[in-house]
Amino acid sequence: MRIAVIGPTSMMWDELADEVEADLARLRRPGVEVTYVLTGDGPRSITTDEDEQAAAPHVVATAERCQREGFDGVIVDCTGDPGVAEARSRVGIPVVGAGEAVRRAVASARPPVVVLSGDELRAGDPDALLERVREARTVVLGGTGWSHLVALLAGEGRVVLDPLDVALARCLAMIAGDQAG
Protein backbone atom coordinates (compact mmCIF):
# COMPACT_ATOMS: atom_id res chain seq x y z
CA MET A 1 0.00 0.00 0.00
CA ARG A 2 1.30 3.46 -0.93
CA ILE A 3 0.32 6.65 0.87
CA ALA A 4 1.44 10.13 -0.18
CA VAL A 5 1.74 12.86 2.43
CA ILE A 6 1.33 16.13 0.54
CA GLY A 7 3.39 19.09 1.72
CA PRO A 8 1.12 22.02 0.78
CA THR A 9 3.71 24.81 0.61
CA SER A 10 6.36 26.07 -1.77
CA MET A 11 9.16 25.04 0.56
CA MET A 12 11.86 22.92 -1.03
CA TRP A 13 12.97 19.46 0.12
CA ASP A 14 16.28 20.65 1.55
CA GLU A 15 14.36 23.04 3.85
CA LEU A 16 12.10 20.29 5.18
CA ALA A 17 14.13 17.10 4.91
CA ASP A 18 15.18 16.70 8.54
CA GLU A 19 11.70 17.29 9.96
CA VAL A 20 9.96 15.26 7.27
CA GLU A 21 12.35 12.32 7.50
CA ALA A 22 11.60 12.11 11.23
CA ASP A 23 7.86 12.17 10.51
CA LEU A 24 8.18 9.49 7.84
CA ALA A 25 10.21 7.25 10.15
CA ARG A 26 7.53 7.61 12.83
CA LEU A 27 4.73 6.88 10.34
CA ARG A 28 6.27 3.65 9.04
CA ARG A 29 3.98 0.63 9.23
CA PRO A 30 4.53 -2.90 7.93
CA GLY A 31 3.32 -3.16 4.36
CA VAL A 32 2.78 0.60 4.01
CA GLU A 33 5.02 2.87 1.97
CA VAL A 34 4.65 6.50 3.06
CA THR A 35 6.14 9.09 0.70
CA TYR A 36 6.32 12.85 1.15
CA VAL A 37 5.28 14.75 -1.99
CA LEU A 38 5.80 18.50 -2.27
CA THR A 39 3.39 20.69 -4.19
CA GLY A 40 6.34 22.96 -4.99
CA ASP A 41 4.08 25.98 -5.23
CA GLY A 42 1.82 28.17 -3.14
CA PRO A 43 2.63 29.97 0.12
CA ARG A 44 5.87 29.35 2.06
CA SER A 45 3.87 28.47 5.15
CA ILE A 46 0.22 28.21 6.08
CA THR A 47 -0.91 30.33 9.00
CA THR A 48 -3.96 32.20 7.64
CA ASP A 49 -7.15 31.49 5.70
CA GLU A 50 -5.57 33.28 2.74
CA ASP A 51 -2.59 30.91 2.87
CA GLU A 52 -4.99 27.94 2.85
CA GLN A 53 -6.82 29.33 -0.17
CA ALA A 54 -3.54 29.94 -2.01
CA ALA A 55 -2.33 26.40 -1.27
CA ALA A 56 -5.57 24.62 -2.21
CA PRO A 57 -5.22 24.44 -6.03
CA HIS A 58 -1.68 23.09 -5.69
CA VAL A 59 -2.85 20.42 -3.24
CA VAL A 60 -5.58 19.37 -5.67
CA ALA A 61 -3.13 19.13 -8.59
CA THR A 62 -0.72 17.13 -6.44
CA ALA A 63 -3.47 14.74 -5.31
CA GLU A 64 -4.39 14.18 -8.96
CA ARG A 65 -0.73 13.48 -9.78
CA CYS A 66 -0.48 11.06 -6.83
CA GLN A 67 -3.49 9.13 -8.11
CA ARG A 68 -1.94 8.91 -11.58
CA GLU A 69 1.30 7.67 -9.99
CA GLY A 70 -0.54 4.81 -8.28
CA PHE A 71 -0.81 5.97 -4.68
CA ASP A 72 -3.65 4.35 -2.74
CA GLY A 73 -4.42 7.44 -0.65
CA VAL A 74 -3.16 10.91 0.24
CA ILE A 75 -2.85 12.90 3.44
CA VAL A 76 -2.57 16.69 3.43
CA ASP A 77 0.14 17.77 5.89
CA CYS A 78 -1.69 20.79 7.31
CA THR A 79 -4.40 21.03 9.95
CA GLY A 80 -6.11 23.74 7.89
CA ASP A 81 -6.87 21.02 5.29
CA PRO A 82 -6.29 23.19 2.20
CA GLY A 83 -7.77 21.68 -0.94
CA VAL A 84 -9.01 18.50 0.78
CA ALA A 85 -12.68 18.81 -0.17
CA GLU A 86 -11.95 19.73 -3.78
CA ALA A 87 -9.31 17.01 -4.15
CA ARG A 88 -11.84 14.47 -2.88
CA SER A 89 -14.23 15.49 -5.62
CA ARG A 90 -11.51 15.10 -8.26
CA VAL A 91 -9.78 11.82 -7.38
CA GLY A 92 -10.94 8.29 -6.70
CA ILE A 93 -8.58 7.58 -3.81
CA PRO A 94 -9.01 8.59 -0.16
CA VAL A 95 -7.94 12.16 0.62
CA VAL A 96 -7.51 12.85 4.33
CA GLY A 97 -6.84 16.21 5.91
CA ALA A 98 -4.68 16.11 9.03
CA GLY A 99 -6.99 18.66 10.68
CA GLU A 100 -10.24 16.86 9.99
CA ALA A 101 -8.73 13.56 11.11
CA VAL A 102 -7.56 14.94 14.44
CA ARG A 103 -10.87 16.77 15.02
CA ARG A 104 -12.70 13.50 14.40
CA ALA A 105 -10.44 11.71 16.89
CA VAL A 106 -11.08 14.40 19.52
CA ALA A 107 -14.80 13.58 19.42
CA SER A 108 -14.09 10.21 21.03
CA ALA A 109 -11.05 11.20 23.10
CA ARG A 110 -10.84 10.68 26.84
CA PRO A 111 -11.47 13.95 28.72
CA PRO A 112 -10.18 16.26 29.84
CA VAL A 113 -8.84 17.22 26.42
CA VAL A 114 -6.32 20.02 25.93
CA VAL A 115 -5.65 21.33 22.43
CA LEU A 116 -2.26 22.99 21.99
CA SER A 117 -2.51 25.72 19.39
CA GLY A 118 0.06 26.31 16.70
CA ASP A 119 1.13 29.47 18.54
CA GLU A 120 1.67 27.54 21.77
CA LEU A 121 3.66 24.88 19.93
CA ARG A 122 5.76 27.47 18.07
CA ALA A 123 6.65 29.17 21.37
CA GLY A 124 8.64 26.00 22.08
CA ASP A 125 8.75 26.26 25.89
CA PRO A 126 8.63 22.65 27.15
CA ASP A 127 7.92 23.67 30.74
CA ALA A 128 5.00 25.87 29.68
CA LEU A 129 3.60 23.08 27.49
CA LEU A 130 3.84 20.56 30.34
CA GLU A 131 2.09 22.96 32.70
CA ARG A 132 -0.65 23.57 30.11
CA VAL A 133 -1.38 19.83 29.76
CA ARG A 134 -0.89 18.90 33.43
CA GLU A 135 -4.56 17.98 34.02
CA ALA A 136 -5.19 16.53 30.53
CA ARG A 137 -5.88 12.91 29.73
CA THR A 138 -5.76 13.67 26.00
CA VAL A 139 -3.47 16.24 24.38
CA VAL A 140 -4.12 17.37 20.82
CA LEU A 141 -1.33 18.86 18.74
CA GLY A 142 -3.00 21.74 16.91
CA GLY A 143 -0.63 21.58 13.97
CA THR A 144 1.61 19.23 12.04
CA GLY A 145 5.37 19.20 12.41
CA TRP A 146 5.32 18.85 16.19
CA SER A 147 5.53 15.06 16.53
CA HIS A 148 8.90 15.40 18.27
CA LEU A 149 6.90 16.66 21.28
CA VAL A 150 4.79 13.51 21.62
CA ALA A 151 7.23 11.75 23.96
CA LEU A 152 7.48 14.84 26.18
CA LEU A 153 3.72 15.35 26.41
CA ALA A 154 2.65 11.70 26.70
CA GLY A 155 3.79 11.23 30.29
CA GLU A 156 1.54 10.55 33.27
CA GLY A 157 -1.01 8.48 31.35
CA ARG A 158 -1.77 11.11 28.74
CA VAL A 159 -2.57 10.20 25.15
CA VAL A 160 -1.25 12.60 22.51
CA LEU A 161 -3.16 12.94 19.25
CA ASP A 162 -0.67 13.88 16.56
CA PRO A 163 -2.48 14.98 13.38
CA LEU A 164 -0.33 12.96 10.97
CA ASP A 165 -0.59 9.75 13.01
CA VAL A 166 -4.35 10.13 13.24
CA ALA A 167 -4.61 10.98 9.53
CA LEU A 168 -2.59 7.93 8.54
CA ALA A 169 -4.81 5.66 10.63
CA ARG A 170 -7.89 7.24 9.03
CA CYS A 171 -6.47 6.90 5.51
CA LEU A 172 -5.58 3.25 6.05
CA ALA A 173 -9.05 2.54 7.45
CA MET A 174 -10.64 4.22 4.43
CA ILE A 175 -8.53 2.16 2.05
CA ALA A 176 -9.35 -1.05 3.94
CA GLY A 177 -13.05 -0.13 3.76
CA ASP A 178 -12.76 0.55 0.02
CA GLN A 179 -11.01 -2.77 -0.52
CA ALA A 180 -13.53 -4.65 1.61
CA GLY A 181 -16.46 -3.16 -0.30
Image: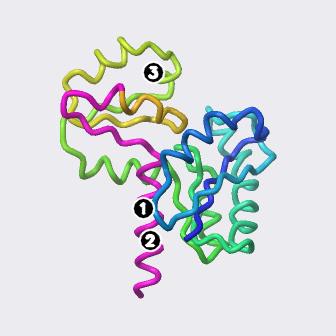
Which residue appears at 54% of the width and 69% of the height?
Answer: 94
The residue range painted magenta reads 152-181
| Residue 178 painted magenta | yes
Q: Which residue is mark 1?
A: 170
Q: Which residue is mark 2?
A: 174
Which residue appears at 52% of the width and 60% of the height?
Answer: 96
Q: Which residue is mark 3?
A: 120
Residue 31 located left or right of residue 85: left
Q: Mark 1 to mark 2: distance in Å? A: 6 Å
Which residue appears at 47% of the width and 24% of the height?
Answer: 121
Q: Quadrant of residue 142?
A: top left
| Residue 59 painted magenta | no
The answer to which of 25 and 35 lies nearer the viewer is 25
* In the depicted structure, whether residue 55 falls above or below residue 67: above
Q: Quadrant of the N terminus?
A: bottom right
Q: Position of residue 18 (x, y in %)?
A: 65, 34
Q: Nearer the viewer, mark 3 or mark 1?
A: 1
Question: How many neighbours does mark 3 have within 10 angstroms: few (below 14), some (14-19), or many (20 or more)?
Answer: some
Badge 3 amino acid: Glu
Question: How many neighbours does mark 1 have within 10 angstroms: few (below 14), some (14-19), or many (20 or more)?
Answer: many
The local secondary structure at tag 2 comes to helix
Residue 153 located left or right of residue 28: left
Badge 1 amino acid: Arg
Q: Mark 3 to mark 1: distance in Å? A: 26 Å
